[in-house]
Image: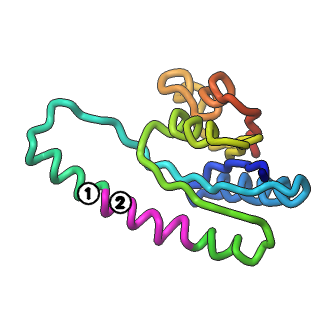
Amino acid sequence: MKKKIVVGYDGSSASGNALDFAVNLAKASQSGLVVAHILEWSPYTFLTPTELEERHARRTEELERAKSAVLDPVMQKLSDSGIEAASELRYGHIAETLIKVAEADDVEQLVIGRTGHSQLSSRIFGSVAGSLAQASPVPVTIVP
């Protein structure tokens, strides 16, 4: 079975750099590529049933918008690259959800772009890169 590389992609220039790196890596290693876009989401347990229903409708709209605005254009571009590529669109904590994607069979590496958050922000809120480096079941490459 073909090995896979997972790349976190959100449409930013940093994630574009990560995608370019991952495409070159996939070509060199004859691996497949999984482009993962994660929409940050945290569950609220104190919402009423009506509020939960409205939130679900908004999430569905957000997923459709992310697919058409972020994933579809990049997947179209990748269709001409000659590599086997798939996409994953999920809700959740970014690092935790990327780890779940990377836990799929035959994933050999996870690639993300580095964002320009300050050290203070990273200390207070944590960083996706730091969380992935500590918890990922596969090697993580952070692309500047």
Q: Say which residue label 2 marks.
A: 62
Q: Is residue 5 magenta?
A: no
Mark number displayed over residue 58 = 1
From the viewer's perspective, is residue 120 above or below residue 34? above
Return the residue nearer the eye: 19 or 98: 98
Judged by its main secondary structure, the magenta piece is helix
Q: Are marks 2 and 1 in contact (CB under 8 Å)?
A: yes
Amino acid carrying label 1: it is: Arg
Where's residue 113, x and y in %?
68, 46
Mark 1 lies on a secondary structure that is: helix
Where's residue 74, x and y in %?
62, 69
Return the residue nearer the eye: 34 or 21: 34
For the magenta stretch, what is the residue range?
A: 60-72
Q: Quadrant of residue 79?
A: bottom right
Return the residue nearer the eye: 110 or 18: 110
Q: Give the Cα separation between the discs numbered 2 and 1.
A: 6 Å
Pointer 2 local density, CA inside 10 Å: few below 14, some 14–19, many at least 20: some
